[in-house]
Amino acid sequence: MNHFEPRDGELACEDVPLRRIAEAVGTPVYVYSSATLERHFTVLRDALTGAGLKDPLIAYAVKANPNLAVLRTLGALGAGADTVSEGEVRRALAAGIPAERIVFSGVGKTAAEIAFALDAGVAEINVESEPEMRLVDRIAAERGVRAQIAIRVNPDVAAGGHAKIATGKSENKFGVSFSEAERLYAQASNAVGLKPVGVACHIGSQITDLAPMAEAFGKMRGLVERLRAEGLSVERLDLGGGLGVPYFNQPTPPSPADYAAMIGRVMQGLDIQLAFEPGRVIAANAGVLLARVLHVHERPEGRRFLVLDAAMNDLLRPAMYDAWHDIRPVAPRAGEAGPYDVVGPVCETGDTFARDRALPPFEAGDLVAFMSAGAYGASMASEYNSRPLAPEVLVKGDRYAVVRARPTYEEMLAREAAAPWL
Ligand code: LLP
């Protein structure tokens, strides 16, 4: 459920008509709904606590939507943060999320990033390989602290919507095998700079089937039991993110309640704190990308192009993953739906949001909304073709605020300089 619904025939975000935002801020623009973010977080939290899980840490995956106002909205509800770079750790801290709710993951953390995370006092550094564990040990020992680490395990389970976002198979770059995890955990408990607090996994994103998750989580439980049988303390089990969302014509994902119930079953009787790293399920349906139709271009061969002022640099998912986003007119015109190719102005054929999409009639100047664009939309945007980053707006009830302004062309150019010999 989200809060983008028609009001008096026009699409609104909560109580604010999208047209008002487009007129005031310009297009393309990302628009987020506070009520939807809050609802998604509380539904998931209530489902997890309702399934009898003790004090779960819900560390929102910052990469999905790292806007400070989004982080602040979720942080105020008790969300932690799953981060994968110093930049994300800094964002989470700047948004007021306490370090003890921040998890630092990622396959290749630099020494500087690890040092920063240790100095900030993050709850857990998820180490993904033996060399990385050695590096964390050395940096922590130099500082006279013991880094709280979790070993990221690759459970070798296939899951996730698209090959580019599946992470849980052994051929993927993420994490270590179960046997390696046992060896590393034992070593870590004797290292001067390390305090192993748990084990972690994340098997992929946009997962719409609970079975692979249940399989992976069952294997993780087995690992915790083996480690404990060896006399090692395991306080936390981090199950990652990955729960899918409905992108309209995709398979219907399990509800947070079904997800939580499955976890309750798999973990029954295991006395442990569970951690989660949900991104998409919190943010995707809490945001839209609002764009304007520049031209309706009919080719004599019969194709009809809807040329928008948004492009692949603003919303990369269709070009990168063949992702399907629902495209809605903000103020639908009467008339029969017909097929459109919806494209952006970037000089690549890949800059195509949809082909042969049945849509109602459009005219130049009309507004369209790309639905479910709150996760991995703005966060993956670039300035390709020297197009300034789209601004971001957060709505709450009948109010809205620009939470990231559109950079001016002057700002864009001022970041660069001529080399001395030019
Ligand atoms: N934890 C880890 C370690 C991750 O790598 C990810 C996502 C998450 C949590 C959050 O997963 P989520 O709950 O959002 O599925 N750009 C792609 C998605 C990439 C996901 C990468 N890792 C897309 O637009 O579909």
Image: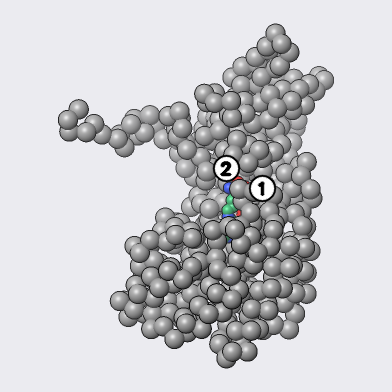
Residue lying at the far bottom of the rendered structure: 231
Beta carbon of the mark 1 residue lies under 8 A of ligand 1 = yes
Q: How many marks?
A: 2
Q: Give the residue number, with chain letter if any, for mark 2.
A: 377
Q: Which mark is residue 13?
A: none
Residue lying at the far top of the rendered structure: 300
Q: Position of residue 358 (x, y in %)?
A: 77, 26
Q: Position of residue 418 (x, y in %)?
A: 24, 31
In this view of the protein, can residue 219 be seen by the observer?
yes
Q: Between residues 34 and 198, which one lies in front from this camera angle?
A: 198
- Depth-wise, is mark 2 or mark 1 nearer the camera? 1
Residue at 39%, 66% in the rendered image: 114
**249 versus 92 height, above or below:** above
Mark 2–mark 1 distance (CA, rounded to whole Å): 16 Å
Residue at 74%, 28% in the rendered image: 357
Q: Amino acid at mark 2?
A: Gly
Q: Earlier in the sequence, mark 2 or mark 1?
A: 1
Q: Give the residue number, with chain letter if any, for mark 1.
A: 162
